[in-house]
Image (spheres, rainbow, N blue to C red):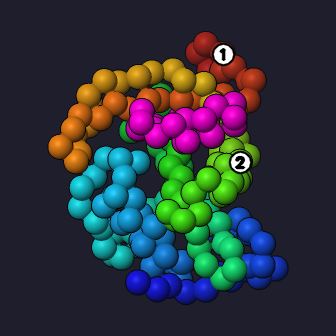
Amino acid sequence: MGGAACGGAGGCGDVIIRDAIEADLPMILEIYNEIIVNTTAVYSESPVTLDDRRGWWRGRLERGYPVLVACEDGRVNGFASFGEFRAWPCYRHTVEHSVHVRAERRGHGLGSALVQALIPQAANLGKHVMIAGVDATNGASLRMHERLRFEKVAHFREVGHKFGRWLDLVFLQRILDARRIGRGVVQ
């Protein structure tokens, strides 16, 4: 499965982190479906369609949330985004992010670069906390998040089931700013 070449300012000689465009969706789909089929990074068992990814991308943009891609040598090799942590209004200052990297490019810093690019965008939107949900066996992702100053706050045992086994989910969080919302103040 192919996809459009990376665009944007500056080309794609080195790693470029930029906003995803619709032409990136086939490569985002390729990365996402490989992860669904081969890993426990996404607790889903069925590959998704291009229409699904298009709806996801449009939904993020309509809410003012970024979808970023990491481009190298004309190819999207990773993507990241964030969205609502929970649907209830009192969680409006908290987002949960996702970051996914092409199999052969994992461990080369793309995930870190993508998350580092998301953090200021969340802060600029007035978000206070960013959450990461990581499969407990994904040591590389857990270490990456800890290096980026995320703190482990929960370990849920056997909450997912994939590949014939129970999966544990770890929640990590990073407080994005030091502001505290006062009692009785609605923002």
Disc on the earlier residue, 2 or 1? 2
Span of residues in magenta: 130-149
Report which residue position mark 2 lands on: 116
Q: Secondary structure at mark 2?
A: helix
Name the mark on residue 182: 1
- Tell me, yes or no, whether the two marked residues, 2 and 1, touch with CB atoms within 8 Å: no
Number of numbered discs visible in the structure rendering = 2
- Quadrant of the image for the C terminus? top right
Left or right of 52 on screen, residue 141: right
- Residue 174 vs residue 70, the one in the foreground: 70
Where is residue 104 shown, x and y percent of the image?
54, 65
Q: Is residue 123 above or below residue 16?
A: above
The residue closer to the viewer here, 146 or 86, is 146
- Give the numbered dot on residue 144: none
- Please say whether residue 147 is one of the residues in the magenta stretch: yes
- Give how far apart the Cα atoms at labels 2 and 1 are: 28 Å
Task: Say what amino acid the circle numbered 1 marks.
Answer: Gly
> Picture quarter containing residue 88?
top left
Q: Decide whether residue 29 is among the magenta residues.
A: no
Quarter holding the N terminus is: bottom left
User: Label 1 neighbourhood size at 10 Å, few (<14), some (14-19), many (20+)?
Assistant: few
> Percent from the top left, x then y, of residue 146?
64, 31
Q: Nearer the viewer, residue 20 or 44?
A: 44
Residue 121 seen anywhere in this rendered image of the structure:
no
Q: In the rendered structure, which amino acid carries the disc numbered 2? A: Gln
